[in-house]
Image: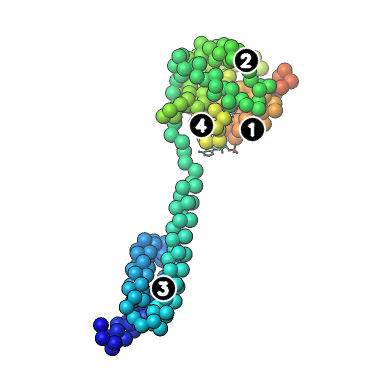
Amino acid sequence: MIESDKGESLKAWVAFCFVGYLLCLGSEGSYGQRRDEVRSELERYLHNLTSLKNTVSPIFAHFSGMCKTIVQTKIRYHLRGVAEMSQKIVDLPTQPAFVIRPVERHELEKLIEIYRSGYEGLEEYAETDEKDIRDYLEWLYEGEPNGFLVAETESELIGFISVHTDWWDRRYQRRTAEFHELVVKRDWQSKGIGKALMMAGLDYARAKGCEYASLWVGEGNLKARKWYHRLGFEEVGKSWGVWVRMVKKLINDV
Ligand SMILES: CC(C)(COP(=O)(O)OP(=O)(O)OC[C@H]1O[C@@H](n2cnc3c(N)ncnc32)[C@H](O)[C@@H]1OP(=O)(O)O)[C@@H](O)C(=O)NCCC(=O)NCCS
């Protein structure tokens, strides 16, 4: 390339770079929608600047180096924006995929581990001996097989609920849907599984014509007590020192 051509082309490139940079500064607000486009434009500037640097004299190459640094900084800034936005999307809470269905008798054995893990730290309100747990699960199942529901992911059972809908509430002398048990495996808690099980149990009780739901919860099981409150259960009394009675009306409650 002859010297005067180089000079002309250099001026054109420098002007191009500045216009590019000013456009970058001025269009900050629209990057949200055009981020990918802008990024590829900036990358093209960068590429052009690199070729320019390799073909012009050292003094202009130095100048283009400065432009290059500015443009690179802009690119870094935008790439960081994209990365932060992607991270936010990744961090959004997601609903785990699970189904709720009636348990099958042969699965009761698998529920022993879930029961133990769910009640970790709350053993004073639970059976602890394996045989007692097994007998208890059998008793729940025999009482009403269709009222015994499990939550299941693709690979494992993660929680269960048991309700007997033909239970007699002695306190109020009326029929009630008695929720004898609800437990979610420890590492699956606080993901909406308990609530989904309870909703399914309440629907089942309504379908069986129950007007009330009731349960006993350990007095010191504050998380569960608060949790039942939020689902519309009210505390109506205590018994045997450590148990709190909770009741919910099922008609017109939704
Ligand atoms: C009580 C128990 C059944 C609740 O089940 P859970 O699956 O943990 O309950 P949920 O996830 O539906 O709701 C609990 C919390 O998760 C939150 N949550 C609900 N859906 C959510 C979701 N999709 N993503 C993230 N959090 C969610 C709720 O807002 C609630 O918030 P909190 O942190 O203020 O408590 C469970 O803690 C348990 O098994 N405890 C031990 C046994 C027990 O005490 N049983 C009761 C005997 S009476």
Query: How far apart are labels 1 and 4 at the CA level?
Result: 15 Å
> Is disc 1 surrounded by few (<14), some (14 to 19) or many (20+) residues within 10 Å?
few
Camera-nearest label, 3 or 2: 3
Residue 211's quadrant in the figure? top right
Look at the picture and state if 220 lies above or below 177: below
Camera-nearest label, 2 or 1: 2
Camera-nearest label, 1 or 3: 3
Residue placed under numbered mark 2 in the picture: 129
Query: How far apart are labels 2 and 1 at the CA level?
Result: 24 Å
Q: Name the element at disc 1.
A: helix
Decide if residue 212 is in sight here.
no
Identify the residue at horizontal 38%, vertical 64% (top origin). Answer: 39
Identify the residue at horizontal 44%, vertical 16% (top origin). Answer: 104
Residue 41's quadrant in the figure? bottom left
Residue 68: numbered disc: 3
Q: Amino acid at mark 4?
A: Ile
From the top left corner, tell me how far across and down residue 191 is, in percent: 52, 36
- Left or right: 102 in relation to 245: left
From the top left corner, tell me how far across and down residue 149 is, in percent: 48, 22
Look at the picture and state if 133 lies above or below 236: above
**Residues at badges 2 and 1 in contact (C-beta under 8 Å)?**
no
Q: Is mark 1 within 8 Å of ligand 1?
A: yes
Decide if residue 42 is in sight here.
yes
Q: Is mark 4 within 8 Å of ligand 1?
A: yes
Which numbered disc flags the more N-terminal residue, 1 or 4? 4
Which numbered disc flags the more N-terminal residue, 4 or 2? 2
Residue 223: numbered disc: 1
Q: Is mark 3 within 8 Å of ligand 1?
A: no
